[in-house]
Image (tube, helix red, strand yellow):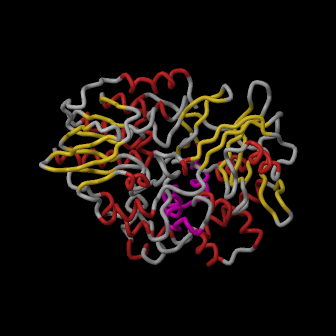
Amino acid sequence: MNNSRSLSRRTLIRAGGATALGAGAATALARPAAARHRAPSADYDAIVIGAGFAGATAARDLRDKGLRPLVLEARDRIGGRVWSTTHFGEQIELGGTWLHPNYHRTYAEMRRYGLTTVGDVAPTTFIVPTESGYRPVDPVATGARMDELLGQIFDGSRQYFERPEEPLFRADLLAKVDRLSLADRMTQLRLSTQDLNLIEGQMATYSGGNAAQGGLTALAQWWALCGWTPEGWNQMNAARVKNGAVTLIQAILDGAQADVRLSTPVAKISEAGGRVTVTTKSGAQFSAPVAVVAVPLNKWKSIQFSPGLPAVHAAATKEGVGIRPIAAKMWIRLAGNLERVAVQGAAGDPIASMFTHGYLSNGDSLMIAINGPGLDVTSKASVDAAIKRVLPDSRVVDMRVQDWANDPFSDGGWGMRKPGQMLRQLPAIHQPHGRITFANGDMPSGWIGSFEGAIETGARAASQAAALV
């Protein structure tokens, strides 16, 4: 793999979640609002709450099993933590975006619906923090050192994640490392200041701003799923869905032939007498034999469950899995045709990660960035000042920001387990709660914080729900 391309993949951080939308996809977004609308008392076989990858997959699979699903979505759009839209006259992704070649379920769905991928252009310059400030570095030598550091951090994962899609296969070995944070692991390695400058910012960004919050096993499992190699790791952002990730969600949802209700947040889910009743915040009620809760795990606590959630589910949503407090994805228009750059921020700096996405028709540079601690992402002046620390000659012309940590329907970004959460949550969190099943990208067996993980859980939840009907 081209070394500069590897560096660009290494610095891209998935917003969850993990994200480009043309006219076709925009039309697709409008379809659910006009979809097969029935009265609240209509007869449904299953209710799916949430219209992201997990919910769409669950609804489609329920339809494939001969059941009639209703989909309730709190937002005024489908997609959840995937948000394809337009700004700057360009297609942009405000949430989850990228695909790894090992996303086997995701690519199977794309083949099913005839969708294709596109890649991104590699940077020509890589900028990292040094003891004397941000400096451009040799991409080949720096890339090789970063690969070595990743190998050290995840050393042993070939043993404790012998079967990465079955993370508990070697639970005996996992117990020795699941309690560790990424910060703990870097401390164990006694890294030099220079090496910490290279790697600590990346680990902190994946963890929501602080590497002490991110579980070692969360990223070590990604490493294992990538094939235990830096070459595999560097493909985590190898491609994205042509015309926007939401086009795949729309295709799956179309296959569900579901009644889809947008702008319908749920307040309460209760089970009694072999039925599940879902009450919306507006007071409307829907009833079915089963329900699939496909909202972000962090939001379970905002829904009243009767009977109450099992202990493992209640603890998980109280602790949270979707990253916080740093989870904003920023699209930024910089004046002028700047060189293609990839920036890895230092831990604690206001810009955690930034790279050139492309160029606008007038020649201005279009950047994607992830915020760091203390950055006011609502202030163009603050963002401009932060970027000038890295690119002194830059000037912010316009920006579009989605702050997932403060989004009322996600309460966090991509899924990233904290220390100890894997063994505390798996496998109990996958079990139904009576006639209620659960799905989202925060609780898979495999690829946490990804399309792949959401599809995995949606399929499992649908199978569990169908077995209860």
**Tag count:** 0
Q: Which residues are magenta?
A: 212-238
Residue extending farthest front? 283
Image quadrant holding the C terminus, namely: top left
Taking depth in this image into account, of 21 and 283 the one nearest to the observer is: 283
Q: What residue do we see at 31% from left, 57% from top?
A: 430
Q: What residue do we see at 35% from left, 64% from top?
A: 426
- Left or right for 221, reference 71: right
Q: Indicate whether residue 329 is drawn in magenta.
A: no
- Left or right for 69, reference 156: left
The part of the image, by quadrant, that contains residue 318 is: bottom left
Q: What residue do we see at 80% from left, 28% from top?
A: 363
Q: Indicate whether residue 231 is drawn in magenta.
A: yes
List x then y, in percent, for residue 40.
24, 31
Taking depth in this image into account, of 425 and 311 the one nearest to the observer is: 311
List x then y, in percent, for residue 95.
55, 42
Taking depth in this image into account, of 323 and 7 the one nearest to the observer is: 323
- Left or right for 341, reference 216: right
Q: What residue do we see at 87% from left, 44% from top?
A: 393
Q: Is residue 330 above or below residue 233?
A: above
Taking depth in this image into account, of 90 and 447 the one nearest to the observer is: 90
List x then y, in percent, for residue 123.
74, 44
Q: Is residue 25 above or below residue 55?
A: above
The part of the image, by quadrant, that contains residue 87 is: top right
List x then y, in percent, for residue 278.
26, 43
